[in-house]
Amino acid sequence: MGSTGVLLLNLGGPDGPEDVRPFLYNLFSDPEIIRLPFPWLQKPLAWFISTSRARKSQKNYEEIGGGSPLRRITEEQAAALKTCLQSRGVDAELYVGMRYWHPFTEEAIAQIKADGIGELVVLPLYPQFSISTSGSSFRLLEALWEKDAQLQAIRYSLVPSWYDAPRYVESMVELIRQELAHCPAETTIFFSAHGVPRSYVTDAGDPYQDEIEACVALIMAALGPDHPHVLAYQSRVGPVEWLQPYTEDVIIELGAAGAKHLVVVPISFISEHIETLQEIDIEYRELAEESGIETFRRVPALNTYPGFIAALADLVTDALAAPPCTFSEVNTSRKRVKLYPQERWEWGMTTAAERWNGRLAMLGFLALLLELISGQGPLHMLGWL
Ligand SMILES: C=CC1=C(C)c2cc3[nH]c(cc4nc(cc5[nH]c(cc1n2)c(C)c5CCC(=O)O)C(CCC(=O)O)=C4C)c(C)c3C=C
Ligand SMILES: [Fe+2]
């Protein structure tokens, strides 16, 4: 057997303003992010949305220095985890594989092959599983594995989710307590999770909402029952319904009900990035002030918090000691989860139906183009633009 590797998976983010549009294009090209019945439409729609959203996104990134800190923080986490594993007698190479920007997962896999890794732990940096995050990265890896004999020879193990890992929960509790120490006794703990479209949970069986709720319950059980707390979902994109309640609505409602002090806990992120630094710290803070909230504090993301790095090290050592968790096992244990929605539509289709798919896609694409040029149309009305 060759040496041991740990592959950390994350979403990735633009390094500078010029990366924003291509980053968004990669993100919206992913069928696990926008689920369309017609695969033909995916790339034209990704082009259209990334082009029309780029300016607004660039402006948001400008407010946090022009780019995402996600790569730097993830690389710092990798270095800290390597040291922590070494201190436990585990000598492992660390790799970072981003889904939509550099260093891409494909680049990490090429390095893993070049280094002759024989045993690999695949650890997504998302505590809770979602089709749109860990699921999407697993899907990409599975496709790489299917066509590569060298990868198939690696003894790999996936860590699907770890929202209940004891040292992760403990670390969250410690950071929340540190923040509460600066607040009045009647402060509300406001858990803000990244949202997903509601249909992911109701139709596609995404366990994300259950895992978020279980995670919040574990943290609150450790913190004690005395603190009022709420859970809401942020970062909605597009016209469809997402998981409710929405963070912005709950801030307004709490303000109207007379709440004065909030501590926001970003619950689905373990690193600082645009949705903590810009959306919570700038947009939601402004909204809170307008809603009459006097104290608005945020619990920092875990980043390289030592207890959190120890939690990641526990996950790696546990995965190395246990029987491997493979792609097929993740799919079996989550068999209600529809990771490949588009293949459902392709499967068993006749040639005529395929031809109609193509024609409709072309029509849709032309309509999008027309709307982009004219500045008018249904997407403007729905608020996509
Ligand atoms: C449009 C659908 C999206 C879904 C579904 C989604 C799920 C999801 N995302 C994260 C974590 C991150 N998202 C990030 C950026 C980002 N995400 C979307 C859209 C969806 N996310 C967009 C359009 C963007 C770009 C930023 C913007 O324009 O608003 C990032 C990277 C942030 C950075 O610093 O660059 C992370 C991380 C989770 C956890 C999640 C579902 C559980
Ligand atoms: Fe996102």
Image (cartoon, grey):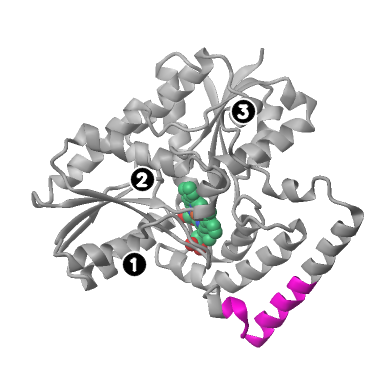
Q: Position of residue 322 (x, y in %)?
A: 52, 14
Q: CA distance from mark 1 to mark 2?
A: 18 Å
Q: Residue tagged by mark 1?
A: 283
* Magenta run includes residue 365: yes
- Outermost residue to the right: 351
35 shown above or below 172 = below
Where on the picture, by quarter, is residue 337? top right
Q: What SS does tag 2 mark?
A: loop
Which mark is nearer the camera, 3 or 1? 3
Where on the picture, by quarter, is residue 227? top left
What residue is rendered at 76% in x and 25% in y?
Answer: 150
| Viewport quadrant of the C terminus | bottom right
Q: Residue tagged by mark 3?
A: 332
Q: Position of residue 218 (x, y in %)?
A: 29, 33
| Viewport quadrant of the N terminus | top right
Q: Residue tagged by mark 2?
A: 267
Span shown in magenta: 363-380
Q: Residues within 10 Å of mark 2 (few under 14, many from 20)?
A: many
Q: Position of residue 283 (x, y in %)?
A: 34, 67
- Of mark 3 and mark 1, the one earlier in the sequence is 1
Which residue type carries mark 3?
Thr
Residue 13 in sight here: no
73 shown above or below 290 = above
Q: Position of residue 187 (x, y in %)?
A: 14, 52
285 shown above or below 130 = below
Specify whether 300 is left or right of 49.
left
